[in-house]
Structure formats: C-alpha cells, structure tokens
Amino acid sequence: MPERVAPQALAWSGWRKSSYSGAEGGSCIEVLDGHPAGVPVRDSKDPHGPAVVFPAAAWREFIGAVKDTTMA
C-alpha cells in the first residue's frame, strides 16, 4: 500500500479527532476529510509534525476492519 508523508500538514485546515480515538486523550489521531490525495492522518499530540496520507480505499478497509473488531 503506497503511503505518502505530508510534512506541510499543519497548513491544511479542517482536521478533526477521529471517532475511534480513545476518550482519555492519550492516543488520538486526527483525520482530514475531503483531501484530493486520500485521507491524511496525524498524531493529535504533534499537530506541527507530518501526516501520513493513505489512499481512500485503504482507509475504508482499515475503518471496516476496526468496526468488525469492535463489533465482535
């Protein structure tokens, strides 16, 4: 699966905390919807750091697997 690192992710607006992140605030990720290259994901504790941009199909598969695991 090709992944791309986006060092300029801080400049993008519209980041939101993933609904799958823990409520305790320790291990949170943020995602950016509607990006033309795929789904950017970053560590919420390091918003100045890079983001990894996943192809949309790979992100959908990942979310589907997470849902399947949590429903089991």
Image (cartoon, rainbow, N blue to C red):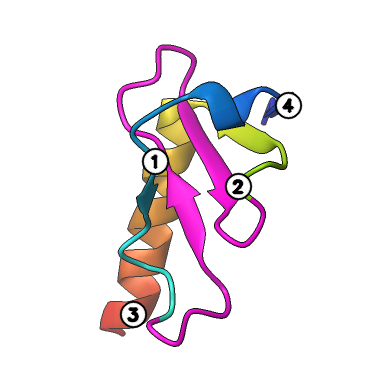
Report helix, strand or loop for mark 3: helix
Q: Residues within 10 Å of mark 2 (few under 14, many from 20)?
A: some
- Residue for badge 3: 70
Report helix, strand or loop for mark 1: loop
Give, as a three-letter code, the residue at label 2. Pro
Q: x and y percent of residue 16 in the render? A: 35, 48
- Residue for badge 1: 15
Sequence-earlier tag: 4 or 1: 4
Q: From what the image shows, is residue 71 above or below residue 54?
A: below
Q: Between 53 and 7, which is closer to the camera in this rendering? A: 7
- Residue for badge 2: 47
Give, as a three-letter code, the residue at label 3. Thr
Residue 22 in the magenta stretch? The answer is no
Q: Is there CB contact under 8 Å for labels 2 and 1?
A: yes
Q: Is there CB contact under 8 Å for labels 1 and 3?
A: no
Q: x and y percent of residue 47 in the render? A: 60, 47
Give the CA separation, mark 2 to mark 4.
11 Å
Sequence-earlier tag: 2 or 4: 4
For image coordinates 42% across by 28% down, the residue present is 56
- Mark toward the viewer: 1 or 3: 1
- Mark toward the viewer: 2 or 4: 2
Which corner quadrant of the image does residue 27 belong to?
bottom right
Q: Quadrant of the C terminus?
A: bottom left
**Left or right side of 27 for 22:** left
Magenta stretch bounds: 23-46
Sequence-earlier tag: 1 or 3: 1
Which corner quadrant of the image does residue 21 belong to?
bottom left
- Residue for badge 4: 7
